[in-house]
Image: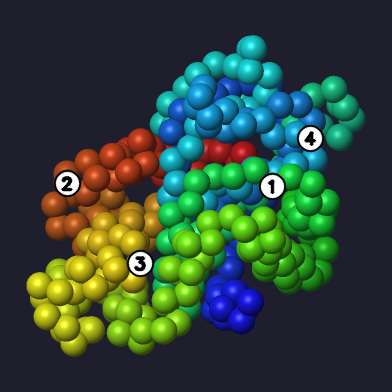
Amino acid sequence: MEEYNKIIESLSVKFIKAKHLDIIQPVRVNNYYDVENTLILLDKGALSFGNDETKTDIKEGDLLFIPAGKPSSVSYGNPASAVAVSNEEFLNNREKYFKKHNLNDSTQESYLYLTFETKVFDTVGFFSSLDIPCFAIAGNRKLAALVRDVVEESENTLPGRDRIVHLNTDQIVVEIIRYIVQNKMFVEQLATNSTYFKDPRLLDIFAYIKDNLGGDLSNKVLAGVANVSEDYVGQYFKMLTGINPQDYIEYQRMEMAVNLLRTSKKSIRGIGNDVGYKDTAYFCRRFKMMFGIPAGKMRRRESLMNV
């Protein structure tokens, strides 16, 4: 249990967005993907995830958790009338499928959602590092109530709103981890994650990568940071984390690129350069391959949509 406490104490949590939406057109999103963790609470109607062979239905009042960076097929609303779309089409046209919740319409299918970042020592994404699939959270009234509180607080203008949202989002992360532990889910992955606390060289690599995403992050450079041989550093990194360093670096670079697209007016070329891609065309190809949407359209949907 002490290892889990160490993990929780190391986490930095950042609230991104929370909304209560009505489903105006049921939709099935193939290969949904985002760089942020998403927690969905089904208020009324239907919600499911997985393909035809592994489809899992979420009951009203239960939740679906989608870890950052984990592709998932998600179906919102009555499956009999759902349209199937790609992730790109979904991200570009969310207004076709959802609208802000109408408190006076009790017949409309609706759901609440919350997106947030959770990082170990403010460097590596916690849930994405576990490499776990999306999963249902059933019968957790406390977690459901917290999601409702965050959505309500995020939409008001009262003093202390941001503070309450931050505190409740912290508690939501703790409740998700408790649910995982209590239900003995992904135990091996959690045990692997605890290695971050046992090897300072790995933490040095994480910190160096975070501070130098626009620079040279070759295995030769990382070997110097960790004081191990260039031939060994890739094996060493993967042994402790389960992924190779260059895959991890690309994910971190793309995560920063998404953040810059959402928060800055820099050009696509400038953003690509800032995150370590000198070839803009290559950056754009890799971005679309990862997210299923061009970088320019990612910026457009962030500026146009508030759902």
Name which of mark 3 and mark 2 comes first in the sequence.
3
In percent of width and height, residue 174 lies at 67, 67
Q: Residues within 10 Å of mark 3 (few under 14, many from 20)?
A: many
Q: Is residue 111 above or below residue 39?
A: above
Whether residues under marks 1 and 4 lie with C-beta atoms below 8 angstroms apart, the answer is: no
Element on which disc 2 rests: helix
Which mark is in front, 2 or 4? 4
Report the Cα–Cα distance between label 3 and label 1: 26 Å
Which mark is in front, 4 or 3? 3
Q: Nearer the viewer, residue 267 or 86?
A: 86
Q: Is residue 50 left or right of residue 89?
A: right
Disc marking residue 37: none
Element on which disc 1 rests: strand
Name which of mark 2 and mark 1 comes first in the sequence.
1
Whether residues under marks 2 and 4 lie with C-beta atoms below 8 angstroms apart, the answer is: no
Q: Is residue 283 above or below residue 50?
A: below
Q: Which residue is mark 1?
A: 137
In this rendering, does residue 138 appear at all? Answer: yes
Disc marking residue 241: 3
Report the Cα–Cα distance between label 4 and label 3: 36 Å
Q: Which amino acid, mark 2?
A: Tyr
Name which of mark 1 and mark 4 comes first in the sequence.
4
Q: Nearer the viewer, residue 247 or 238?
A: 238
Q: Residues within 10 Å of mark 2 (few under 14, many from 20)?
A: few
Q: Which residue is mark 4?
A: 60
Q: Which amino acid, mark 4?
A: Glu
Which mark is in front, 1 or 4? 1
